[in-house]
Amino acid sequence: MSTAPTATRTQAVTATAAVTTTKARGPRRSHLPGQKPFGPLRIAAFVVLLLLAIGWLLPFLWAVATAFKTETDAASGDPGWIGASGPTIEAFTAILSQGNVYTWAFNSLFTSVAITVITLAISALAAYALSRLDFTGRKWLFMVIIASIVVPPQALIIPLFYEMLAFNLIDTYWGLILPQVVAPAMVFILKRFFDAVPIELEDAARVDGAGRFRIFWSIVLPLSRPILASVAIFVFIAAWNNFLWPFLVINDTTLMTLPVGLQTVISAYGVQYAQVMAQAVLAALPLIIVFIIFQKQIVKGVATSGFGGQ
């Protein structure tokens, strides 16, 4: 008995089914499901965003260009991007020739890292307790933390200063670090992330005999590495850029941070515009490097921070 007719009928049925499926699905689209075509509105949105990005970038580029000018060209009011004398690094040389600059850079790095580590530890423990532990007053405590986010830090400057003065922590690293380790916004961000961690994982570990801290250390924290990295970057940037509190609590030039110390470099001959811009570039350079290295974590942190939804 020949199998040719059967094979022919099978091929015909397969071809018919393929044609039917193609007609049912319609023409193949070049964009992802749920994604709108690249139309005029999206093009206009990209153009507007590009113009805004250029508007934000121009002041920084102008600062960089001015930093590479001579003081004469910087003070001449010439709107050109390159001075008449050509690019020069004399402003950077004048700043870096100050012996305390490297000490200030170390102070900024040390205090920023210390603030980041302590803030992560406090915020993660507090967020996990608010997310998993059931204790009296938990909701009220969380409401107080949320309310404290809207309190401007400048409103706490005077009581914090008197507190550091009472504990004799003025002109010390601890006086510089401790008031900056409380971050209610980071507690909120981490709590929202911990709420999304499946409770079944912790129940399974508890059945195996793991305690609360062991569960937190071995299960919750490894699953939270992306959000912890994002929070660490945000805290580090804020600590590095902080000028007001270090300016108030530190008088010893050997303990000054980079943003504060660089303000003392202005000479007695008046404002040196090229040196001021060189200071700004030097202070921003580490943050630019951090952003370039960790930009994926920063974007992920913004997306999962709790303000844009999950």
Image (tube, rainbow, N blue to C red):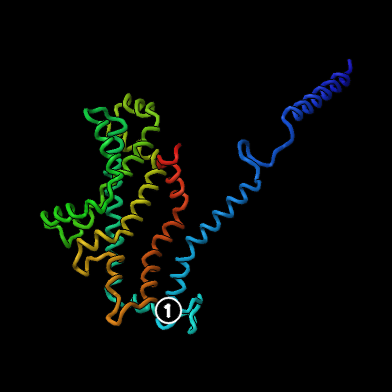
Q: Residue furthest front?
A: 77
Name the one closer to the observer, 237 or 40: 40
Judge from the rendering whether residue 11 lies leftward or rightward of residue 82; answer left or right.
right
Residue 51 locus on image (x, y percent): 54, 58
Name above or below for residue 160 compared with residue 103: above
Taking the spot 44% from the left edge, 76% from the top edge, the residue there is 68
Identify the element where label 1 is drawn: helix
The residue positioned 21% from the left and 54% from the top of the image is 157
Q: Amino acid at mark 1?
A: Ala
* Residue 297, x across and y down, in percent: 44, 48
Q: Quadrant of residue 218?
A: top left
Q: Is residue 69 visible?
A: yes
Q: Which one is nearer the viewer's eye here, 140 or 232? A: 140
The image shows residue 62, relative to residue 69, as above or below, that is above
Q: Where's residue 28, x and y in %?
A: 72, 37
The quarter of the picture where the N terminus appears is top right
Q: Nearer the viewer, residue 280 or 104?
A: 280
Q: Is residue 125 in view from this perspective?
A: no
Q: Position of residue 117 (x, y in %)?
A: 29, 50
Q: How many marks?
A: 1
Residue behind mark 1: 74
- Name which quarter of the figure residue 185 lies in: top left
Q: Residue at x 45, y 66 (%)?
A: 59
> Is 202 left, or right, of 165 in this rendering?
right
Please give the name of the residue rendered at 28% of the width and 75% of the height, measured from the top-left corner. 99
- Hey, which quadrant is residue 227 in on the image? top left
Give the answer, above or below, for where 287 lies relative to 183: below
